[in-house]
Image: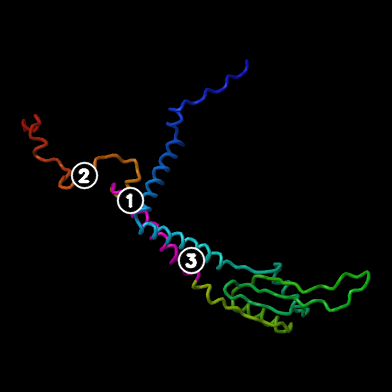
Amino acid sequence: MPKQPAPKKSVIEQRQSTSYKLRQRLSEIGQRALKILLKDPLAWFLLLAAIALGITFFSLLDDIQPQSPGRQVTLTEVTELARDRQIATATLYDQDSRIVLVTRPEERQAREGEPPPRPAETLWAAYPSSGASTGSLLTALQRAGATIVVDQQSDIPTKKILVQFLLPILLLVTLFAFFMRLSDDVGAGGIASFSKFTGRRRMKGDNGGVTFANVAGNPDALAE
């Protein structure tokens, strides 16, 4: 027998589905937030500040990542190139613990049947940050007659402090102030205004406790 097609859900069943309720809730929150933003300049300022802090955070995060041009080689290959005196310039990046090399081009005439002369090439390698390893590497480069440049990258420590500590704290504080501003403007009791809590709010002057008037007519209270 051919299979019966699955019955389609009615409109009521679709509205009772979880995804529909979630979409409705998100739409209500979005409309409520938009209304508040249109009448509250401070909320706009906090939102724009949070966006600016987020962009700055990811931009600085990209800046502190080690980036080196050329092809990666091992430290052993760097030592062999230095021994063969094939390194023209060498730049050591202190914070990244990387060295960028530019090799010497091969100086010979191209002849028929022979491979073309080797051009200059940009290479990079990571080296240990210990002083002894750096010293031996510098000695090998000096013996090779290479031009050595040391880039201390003095701005990297400051950027790391901003990315790891200052900017995350400022971003969290700004977002917290933004959402608190939204909830205060709604006037439904802070963050709970975005929840589904429908309990009775305590009015001014209402102590919320049980008084003598509440139990005065209770038979059990009269019996006692």
66 inside magenta stretch: no
Q: Residue at x 56, y 67 (%)?
A: 63
**Splitting the image into 4 quarters, where does residue 65 fall?**
bottom right
Q: Quadrant of the N terminus?
A: top right
Percent x, y of residue 101: 70, 75
**SS at mark 3?**
helix
Percent x, y of residue 92: 63, 77
> Crowdedness of circle 3 by 10 Å Cα count: few (<14), some, many (20+)?
some
Total tally of numbered discs in the picture: 3
Closer to the camera, 122 or 53?
Answer: 53
Name the amino acid type tagged 3. Val
Q: Please tell me whether mark 3 or mark 2 is closer to you in this view.
A: 2
Q: What's the mark number on residue 202?
A: 2
Q: Residue reaching furthest top? A: 1
> Crowdedness of circle 2 by 10 Å Cα count: few (<14), some, many (20+)?
few
Q: Residue at x 17, y 47 (%)?
A: 204
Residue under pointer 1: 183
Q: Quadrant of the C terminus?
A: top left
Mark before the other along the chain sequence, 1 or 2: 1
Q: Which residues are magenta?
A: 159-188
Answer left or right for 79 relative to 167.
Answer: right
Mark before the other along the chain sequence, 3 or 2: 3
Percent x, y of residue 48: 43, 60
Figure check: 186 above or below 53: above
Q: Residue at x 77, y 80 (%)?
A: 85
Q: Residue reaching furthest right? A: 112
Residue under pointer 3: 163
Alpha carbon separation for disc pair 3 and 1: 29 Å
Mark before the other along the chain sequence, 3 or 1: 3
